[in-house]
Amino acid sequence: MSLGEVLQASPRLKRLGVMEEQSQLKIYQEWEAVAGPTVARNTRPIKLKHGVLTVAVRSGVWMQELSLLKPLLLKKLQVLIKDDSVKDLRLTLSDFDLGKKP
């Protein structure tokens, strides 16, 4: 059993949110690969909490686009992080510059 498997199997680490933090970091790092360059320029993952990934979007048009892409993005995220820690996406309008990386 690998260290990653041991960590994922630990109920205490899951309760403490450690696994969610690792997933969140991986999502931040790989968002452009998951969403594609055009979508990534107009969106940004903000936080992962209780299986819900909050994504900031540039406009109502992009919010509509992401709502249509939601099933595909969820599948890609589950493949990326190799589990089902992302169960849903919550979209929110943002007024900060999404073109800059955090």
Image (cartoon, rainbow, N blue to C red):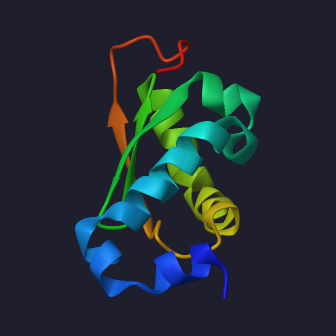
Residue at 40% x, 84% y: name it: 10
Quarter containing the N terminus: bottom right
Q: Position of residue 96 (x, y in %)?
A: 36, 13
Q: Quadrant of residue 75?
A: bottom right
How many tags in the picture? 0
In-image side of 68 versus 88 (left or right): right
In-image side of 78 versus 37 (left or right): left
Residue at 53% x, 83% y: name it: 6
Q: Quadrant of residue 14?
A: bottom left
- Foreground residue, 94 or 52? 52
Q: Position of residue 39 (x, y in %)?
A: 65, 32
In this rendering, is residue 87 above or below 94?
Answer: below
Q: Position of residue 49 (x, y in %)?
A: 30, 58
Residue at 49% x, 32% y: name it: 44
Q: Residue furthest left?
A: 16
Q: Quadrant of residue 91?
A: top left
Residue at 40% x, 54% y: name it: 21
Q: Position of residue 100 (x, y in %)?
A: 53, 12
In-image side of 69 versus 93 (left or right): right
- Foreground residue, 77 or 39? 77
